[in-house]
Image (tube, rainbow, N blue to C red):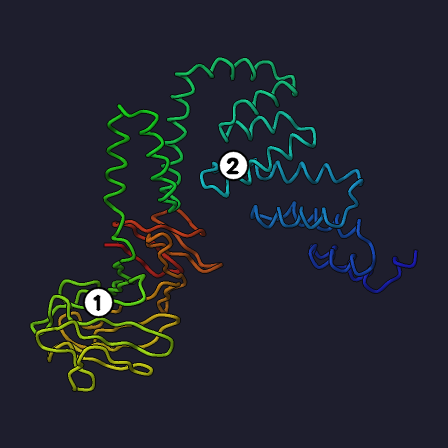
Amino acid sequence: MRRLFSSAYRRARRAEGRGEYREAAALYAEADAPEEAANALLFAAARAEELDARLDAYRDALRWLPEDHPRVEEVEAQIGLAILDEAQRRGAHGADEKRRLEDAAARLERVGKPSEAATAYEILGRHEDMARCLQAAGDVERLEALLEETTEEARRERRLRRLIGDYEMAMAVGARIEARTALRDAIELAPEDRSVADLLRRLEGRFPPSRRLELRVDGRAVSFVGEDAVEVGRDADLVVRGASVSRRHTRLGREGDDLIVTDLDSRNGTLLRGVPVAGEVRVQGGTEIGLGDDVTLKVEPAGEGLRVTVVDGLDRDLVALVGRGELRLEGLAAALSFPGGHATITPDRGAAAELGRQKVAAPVVLLEGDQLTIDGVRVEVP
């Protein structure tokens, strides 16, 4: 009875009445009322719109329930059913989504929901596990249908359709490495299918060069180079045009707080404050350098890398960000990086991002021709 009159318990009841279930759960816990804390979290889960928020609430509720509590199995089942529902609506294409669905299938089987577990295994393409669950559920009709489908040709056609579906969904959400893997698997399964080979050829032709990317951000040209240093010239990592610019004119890098400027035996020289650079020169902080006498670059530290801006010349206002870590452009709620050499843009948490017309939150591996909008800023890969 003592807890009923505690301040924390009374505040928890009021918070629950206002629909602030997370706050109520914390106050119930403070009042040493773990079962009420779990109940509040279950209410929070039931009202959560996003799957991750719902799962977090269910898992937090489990932490407050004793292992032998009769509601534990109910909560475990709700976790599995929530994941299954998401997979039925959106599919399970990425490695993380598949692992989560595998966990849900095992969880549903464990808490005595074999029919639902069978559905999860069906999405995963695990027919033996599906058959076991259907047998446990006594679902003779679905079991017979499954057995009919498991002839070699039926399995092949079903897997091919699933791989093409995986490819299409992965392309839509920006998971292009998974899309390419799905097509390669489809070609291995059906090497005579020219349409699949053509899809793969066109996809691979759209990947930008490794660790290089040109973007237009609200119409502004921005280059990204995922290296420790960048070569600048008419035919280099960072292309800058000008009559006095050599094909490979200068190299710009960073070591600690030092900017490293190296002339690459250019025809008209690399100028630092008007003085020609001989070989390699180290500079503290930002500086301006000249490529001959008609192009000026502003070079400055940016995070762990460099920011290079063309101050004058034919490519005036061109910006390049250089570095092996995350590269960020002011005004863009996203980071650009090159995992595995692939240009990848990751929207900031909470940013409204769309790839074409598809809302995205996970990292997007960029392809030539992509168009994105991130918090109203238009991003294009030419």
Q: Which residue is mark 1?
A: 231
Q: What residue is drawn where x is 75% and y is 49%?
A: 38
Residue 237 rendering spot, x and y as whole percentages: 21, 62
The three-letter code of the residue at mark 2 reads: Ala
The one of 281 and 168 positioned closer to us in this rendering: 281
Outermost residue toward the front in this view: 279
Q: Is residue 158 above or below residue 313?
A: above
Secondary structure at badge 2 equals helix
> Horizontally, is 153 left or right of 309 in the view?
right
Secondary structure at badge 1 equals strand
Residue 203 rendering spot, x and y as whole percentages: 27, 41
Q: What residue is drawn where x is 66% and y is 38%?
A: 78
The quadrant in which the N terminus is found is: bottom right
Answer few, some or many: residues within 10 Å of disc 2's Cα (few below 14, many 20 plus, some between 14 and 19).
Answer: some
Q: Which residue is mark 2?
A: 87
Q: Spatial distance from mark 2 to mark 1, Cα to Cα? A: 46 Å
Q: What is the number of the mark on residue 326?
A: none
Q: What residue is drawn where x is 41% and y is 29%?
A: 162
Q: Is residue 94 above or below residue 187?
A: below
The quadrant in which the C terminus is found is: bottom left
